[in-house]
Structure formats: structure tokens, C-alpha cells
Image (cartoon, grey):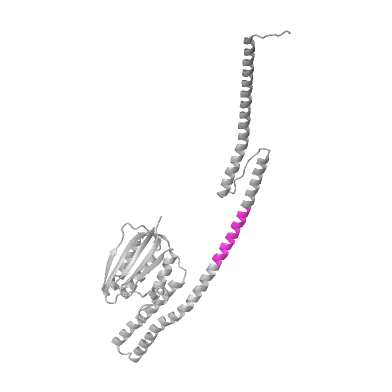
């Protein structure tokens, strides 16, 4: 038998060549697979990231956002469905906005009707008070006129009665004026206003009455108080009412403390007296028209009602703290200039 023998060197060389060839082929196949994987990944990842970003924007309320995906496969179909959903949501949102707008208008009109009805009810309540507050001085005027006619030749007595007539007419004028202030829609002239200056000017107006009533005034005005958004004329009317109200609460004299400060972004003006105080049951009624604890003929009971309405029209508020025998504190809160 003939056996052909190959040299060992030739055999090992061939094996090494095969191994090298297989190695190169394996590396090439791996590189090709990696390249295909990267290409496929990019082709899928880009559109998927666009879908994710679009969903996030839609969730944040950006209903105008649309996807632009052109892959020619199922991902493009998903993007198209997403765009259709966004269109439908946008239409529903516009519909909802229109419905909300109409309902808001209806609510505003209903509120205006409620205010008008409330004003008519209030006028019914006021009628009896107005009649009482006007009839009392009218009775006095009629009595004075009758006495003047009875004693026409007594100049001194006539002058005394004329003074009483004038006083009665002034009282009627105050009632009518305050009633008009309470009932009419005010045209406020809102502008940045120095609240400290308003208080100082009003204290000057009330100075004579306060000194006459033996009332000491203590000022604690914050020089750094920011300006408020308000009408100086009407704010002066509010504080004049509060000062005179405090004066009436201190028939034996006392101390009126006027303080300004800021609280939670609001400018506050505090009017504190050392008077007789207000009972708990009356605190809830002091802003009602014609509510008054003073004797008949002393005050109309409209001052605090008018003041409350003015401050509310300024977008502010009035707080009250009091107890019998411990005086009263009225705190006016107003918006500051930002």
C-alpha cells in the first residue's frame, strides 16, 4: 500500500491559514452585524424619541405640536395616529373654551342680577331708616317755624330757632348725602396714593372735633409704608368716618391711635380707640345700613356702611376687633403698588 506523506511544516502552515481566514471572516461578520444593528437602532430610536417628545409636549398642553415621521412602516402609522389625536384634542379644547366663556358670561350676568336684587332689598331696608332720620329733624324744623310765627317780634328767639332749623337741615343733608354715597356706583380714580398723607390730612379735618371731645391722638405711621392703589378722596372719607366713630365711642375722652404697617404684602391702617367697645353680637352688624347704638339723633348709622363699600370697591377689606369696655380696633387693608 502506498502512503503519501506531507511535510509537517506544510500541514501546520495550512491550518494556520485556515484559522486566519476564519478569524477574518468572523470579524467581518461581527462588524457587519454591528453596523446593521446600529443602523436599525438609529432608524428605530429617532422616531421613537420623537414620539416620546411629542407625547410629553401634548401632556404639557402644547396641542399645536405635530410629529413629522416618514419611516414607511408601523412607526409612521403610529405618528399619524398621534397627530390625529392631537387634532381631536385641540378641537375639544376649543369647544370647551367656548363653553366656559359662555358659562362665565351667564354667571356674570346672574351675579349682576343678584347685586341688583340685593340693592333693591337693601333700599327697602333703608327706606324706614331714611324716613326716621329725616322725619326727626323735620319735626324739629316745623316746631321752630311754628314758634317763629308765634313770636315774630322776638329777634333773639328767632335767631335761636333759625340756628336750630339750620342744624336740622344740615342733618338731613348728611343723611341724603351718605345715602347717595351708599347706593350709587362710584367712579373711583385709582392711582398710587400715599396712605400716610391721607391719614394726616384727615386728622387735620377731624382735629377740632377730637380736641373738643378731649381725645388724644397718637400717630404710629410707618415712614417706609409703600403706596397703595386707591382714591385719596374716598379713602379720606373712610378714615373720617372711622375717626368720628371712635370719637363717639369715647364720650368721656380717651386716646385715638392711628398706626400704619405692612402685612403679607398689604398696606394696613389701624384706627384704635379706648372707648366703650362693641359686643360680640353687634360686631357682625356694625356695617349694616342704619345700625347704630348711639342715642336717636346722634349719627345716621350709614358711615360704616359707606366706608365698608368704599374699601371693598378698592379690592381691600376692613377687620374689626373689640370687646365691651376694651375699646375697638378697625383695620383697613389695601393693595400696594407693585
The percent position of residue 86, horizontal first and vertical second, equals 62, 49
Single out the residue that lies furthest toward the right. 1
What's the residue at 44%, 72% (across, down)?
182
Task: Indicate the quadrant containing the N terminus: top left, top right, bottom left or bottom right.
Answer: top right
The C terminus - image quarter: bottom left
x and y percent of residue 153 in the render?
31, 90
Residue drawn at the location 60% of the way across and 37% of the way down: 45
Quarter-of-image position of residue 271: bottom left
Compared with residue 70, is residue 229 higher up or lower down, i.e. above or below? below
Q: Is residue 166 above or below residue 206?
A: below
Residue 200 seen in render: no
Q: Is residue 91 left or right of residue 128?
A: right
Residue 245 in view: yes
Q: Which SS type dominates the magenta stretch?
A: helix
Seen from the viewer's position, the closer of residues 22 and 66 is 22
Q: Residue furthest front?
A: 1
| Magenta range | 90-109
Residue 103 shown in magenta: yes
Which is more toward the observer, 31 or 70?
Answer: 31
Q: Position of residue 104 (x, y in %)?
A: 56, 62
Q: Is residue 72 magenta?
A: no
Q: Quadrant of residue 291?
A: bottom left
Q: Is residue 83 above or below residue 267?
A: above
The residue most toward the bottom is 150
91 to 113, vertically: above or below: above
Q: Position of residue 150 (x, y in %)?
A: 34, 92
Residue 23 occupies which quadrant of the picture?
top right
Amino acid at each position: 500500500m502506498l502512503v503519501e506523506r506531507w511535510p509537517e511544516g506544510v500541514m501546520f502552515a495550512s491550518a494556520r491559514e485556515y484559522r486566519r481566514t476564519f478569524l477574518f471572516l468572523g470579524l467581518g461578520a461581527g462588524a457587519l452585524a454591528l453596523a446593521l444593528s446600529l443602523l436599525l437602532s438609529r432608524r428605530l430610536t429617532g422616531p421613537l424619541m420623537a414620539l416620546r417628545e411629542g407625547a410629553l409636549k401634548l401632556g404639557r398642553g402644547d396641542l399645536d405640536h405635530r410629529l413629522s415621521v416618514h419611516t414607511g412602516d408601523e412607526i409612521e402609522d403610529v405618528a399619524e395616529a398621534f397627530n390625529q389625536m392631537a387634532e381631536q384634542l385641540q378641537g375639544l379644547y376649543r369647544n370647551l373654551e367656548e363653553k366656559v366663556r359662555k358659562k362665565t358670561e351667564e354667571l356674570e350676568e346672574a351675579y349682576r342680577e343678584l347685586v341688583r336684587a340685593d340693592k333693591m332689598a337693601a333700599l327697602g331696608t333703608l327706606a324706614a331708616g331714611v324716613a326716621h332720620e329725616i322725619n326727626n329733624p323735620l319735626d324739629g324744623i316745623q316746631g321752630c317755624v311754628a314758634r317763629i310765627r308765634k313770636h315774630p317780634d322776638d329777634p333773639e328767639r328767632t335767631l335761636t330757632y333759625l340756628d336750630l332749623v339750620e342744624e336740622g337741615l344740615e342733618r338731613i343733608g348728611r343723611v341724603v348725602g351718605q345715602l347717595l354715597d351708599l347706593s350709587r356706583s362710584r367712579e373711583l380714580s385709582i392711582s398710587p396714593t400715599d396712605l400716610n398723607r391721607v391719614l394726616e390730612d384727615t386728622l387735620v379735618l377731624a382735629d377740632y372735633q377730637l380736641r373738643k371731645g378731649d381725645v388724644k391722638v397718637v400717630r404710629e405711621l410707618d415712614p417706609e409704608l409703600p403706596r397703595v392703589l386707591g382714591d385719596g378722596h374716598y379713602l379720606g372719607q373712610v378714615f373720617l368716618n372711622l375717626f368720628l366713630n371712635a370719637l363717639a365711642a369715647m364720650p368721656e375722652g380717651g386716646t385715638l391711635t392711628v398706626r400704619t404697617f405692612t402685612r403679607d404684602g398689604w398696606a394696613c391702617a389701624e384706627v384704635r380707640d379706648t372707648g366703650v367697645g362693641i359686643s360680640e353680637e353687634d360686631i357682625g352688624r356694625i356695617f349694616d345700613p342704619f345700625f347704630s347704638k348711639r342715642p336717636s339723633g346722634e349719627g345716621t348709622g350709614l358711615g360704616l356702611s359707606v366706608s365698608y363699600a368704599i374699601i371693598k370697591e378698592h379690592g381691600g377689606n376692613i377687620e374689626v376687633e373689640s370687646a365691651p369696655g376694651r375699646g375697638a380696633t378697625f383695620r383697613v387693608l389695601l393693595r400696594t403698588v407693585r
